[in-house]
Amino acid sequence: MGGAGWDRHDPLRHCRALVLLGSVRARRQGAAGKTKGRGSTGHGNPYLARVLGEAAVTAGQTDTFLGERYRRIARRRGKKKAIVAVGRSILVIVGHLLSDPEVRFHDLGPDFYDTRIGPERKKRNHIRQLEALRYKVSLEPAA
């Protein structure tokens, strides 16, 4: 069950099963938008979900990797989805820390995403966006 590397007593898997961050529900779409099958993921642990939500909101106010993650997601998808996403990230971090006593937490920093996008990719994306708006783009290096 699960796949390669899944242990029956995997603490990370157990933590994820406990939470489900409030009452997040997944459903399968059938014909004409009708819900097919059971499609519910359960309600999870509301106490743990609340604590993770509060931790996520607090992390969003810091100058850390999780704070930047919160702001990036909140900018596009809204604050509530950002809280759930960062809460899950916190849960994954805690699960890894609990599963291996030798592991230490190391924050990736708020500029983690900026350093991953190179200047060439950034230039390509901007050109593509401008061309999608029907602009003709020609670039010259600055003197």
Image: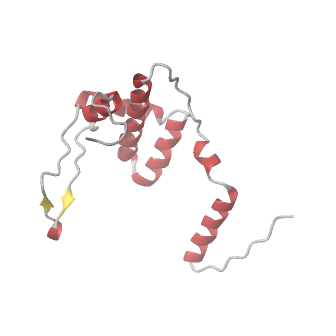
* Residue 79 percent coordinates (x, y): 39, 45
Q: Residue most toward the top?
A: 101
State how many labels appear.
0
Of the pair 74 and 38, the residue shown nearer to us: 38
13 to the left or right of 29: right
Q: Kindly indicate the quadrant of the structure image that contains residue 139.
A: bottom right
Q: Residue most toward the front?
A: 4
85 to the left or right of 106: left
Residue at the spot 44% in from the left edge and 25% down from the top edge: 97
Whether residue 49 can be seen here: no
**Residue 11 vertical position relative to residue 117 in the rendered view, above or below:** above
Whether residue 13 can be seen here: yes
* Residue 137 percent coordinates (x, y): 68, 76
The scheme the figure's colours follow is secondary structure
Of the pair 125 and 133, the residue shown nearer to us: 125
Of the pair 137 and 38, the residue shown nearer to us: 38
* Residue 87 percent coordinates (x, y): 38, 36
77 to the left or right of 40: right
* Residue 143 percent coordinates (x, y): 87, 64
Residue at the spot 69% in from the left edge and 57% down from the top edge: 119
Q: Residue most toward the right?
A: 143
**Residue 140 vertical position relative to residue 99 in the rendered view, above or below:** below
**Where, quadrant-wise, is the N terminus in this rendering?**
top left
Residue at the spot 52% in from the left edge and 26% down from the top edge: 105
Residue at the spot 66% in from the left edge and 80% down from the top edge: 136
Q: Kindly indicate the quadrant of the structure image that contains residue 58.
A: top left
**Residue 143 vertical position relative to residue 107 in the rendered view, above or below:** below
Of the pair 127 and 54, the residue shown nearer to us: 127
**Residue 40 vertical position relative to residue 12 in the rendered view, above or below:** below
